[in-house]
Amino acid sequence: MITDFRNKTAVLTGAASGFGLECARIGARLGMKLVLVDVQQDALDRVAAELQAAHAQVLALKVDVSKAAEVEALGRAVLERFGAPHLVFNNAGVGAGGLIWENSAQDWDWVIGVNLMGVAHGVRVFTPMMLKAAKQDPAYQGHIVNTASMAGLLNAPNMGVYSASKHAVVSISETLYQDLALVTDQISASVLCPFFVPTGINQSQRNRPQEFTTPASQPTRSQMIGQAMSDKAVGSGKVSAAEVAQQVFDAVAVNQFYIYSHPKALASVQTRLEDIMLARNPTDPFNQKPELGLALKQALLATMP
């Protein structure tokens, strides 16, 4: 856990919007040194200027977290500028939906590359340097936070590729927590599982690389339906990204592993776990709001040949 954030270094991916941006703002207010990482240069420049104006020490780097070599170069730059970080927030993520058999190979490569491998690269690059810092300094305290989603604990229809990536992030994070506990009491980990929060992730196609934009990756009807539903759900979210960012810092300060933006959604997680324990077929995710399930079913049936 980290109880005193002043003069500590934070690495934040996806720092130009959403949770990453709001965590960076909190970090600046707490006197942290900030490494801002994003793939969107113009947005990154704006955030860096804002936080430098607030007198924060800032290193802003454009990095595609899905690329191993770029994250490795990021690690070297952080070590050279600030030394080993104390807080690493593997937060960068992209969204995608649609019927799971309609996701193209490009869809899978893009979403898994950012959401899963981005976290994996952050863990493998920064954890060793944090462990080295802990060994050299008994007072050193570090924490790694990975952004998953409630989609990492549930399996909603019409968003399979996204859910698959986020389930993997939950698994990585739980394993990281256990692995760290075997070798150190100076570094720990958390997983952030937000529900529908206005962050801009529903517009992540804006940053889709050209290599993953081909005729095969153009949205299908089911993906357009999923996008519309996501836009509505995210846009109507009542919990702000700033509130969730504060939850992240509060969790780090008390070494809380699971971080939920919407604890009431855990009722659905409990139902899923009971399905597994009782070996019963998956419960209808719309059983509390059947009108939504009917509307989705009718919309999808209309897309069938």
Image: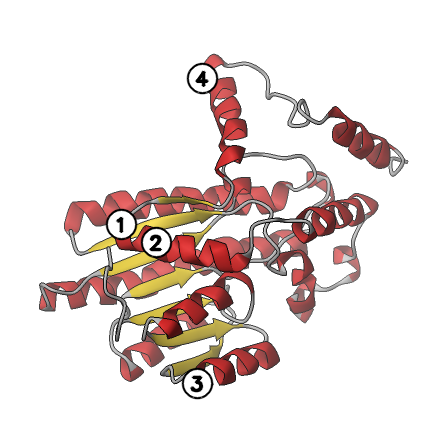
Q: Which residue is mark 1?
A: 254
One can see residue 72 in this view:
no
Q: Which residue is mark 2?
A: 250
- Which residue is at the front of the view, 65 or 293? 293
Secondary structure under tag 3 reads helix
* Badge 1 amino acid: Val
* Badge 4 amino acid: Met
* Badge 3 amino acid: Gln
What separation in Å lies between label 4 and label 2 (alpha carbons)?
33 Å
Total numbered circles: 4
Q: Earlier in the sequence, mark 4 or mark 2?
A: 2
Q: Please, is residue 232 above or below residue 284 in the view?
A: below
Quadrant position of the C terminus in the picture: top right
Residue 300: where, in percent of width, then height?
82, 36
Secondary structure under tag 2 reads helix
- Which residue is at the front of the view, 117 or 178? 178
Instruction: Please state which of the two labelled residues, at mark 4 or mark 2, is closer to the viewer.
Output: 2
Q: Is residue 68 left or right of residue 199?
A: left
Q: Residues within 10 Å of mark 3 (few under 14, many from 20)?
A: some
What separation in Å lies between label 4 and label 3 (alpha carbons)?
51 Å
Q: Residues within 10 Å of mark 4 (few under 14, many from 20)?
A: few
Q: Earlier in the sequence, mark 3 or mark 1?
A: 3
Q: Residues within 10 Å of mark 1 (few under 14, many from 20)?
A: few
Q: Earlier in the sequence, mark 3 or mark 2?
A: 3
Q: Residue at x 28, y 70 (%)?
A: 85
Q: Which mark is residue 277?
A: 4
What separation in Å lies between label 3 and label 2 (alpha carbons)?
24 Å
- Whether the residues at callouts 1 and 2 have beta carbons within 8 Å, the answer is yes
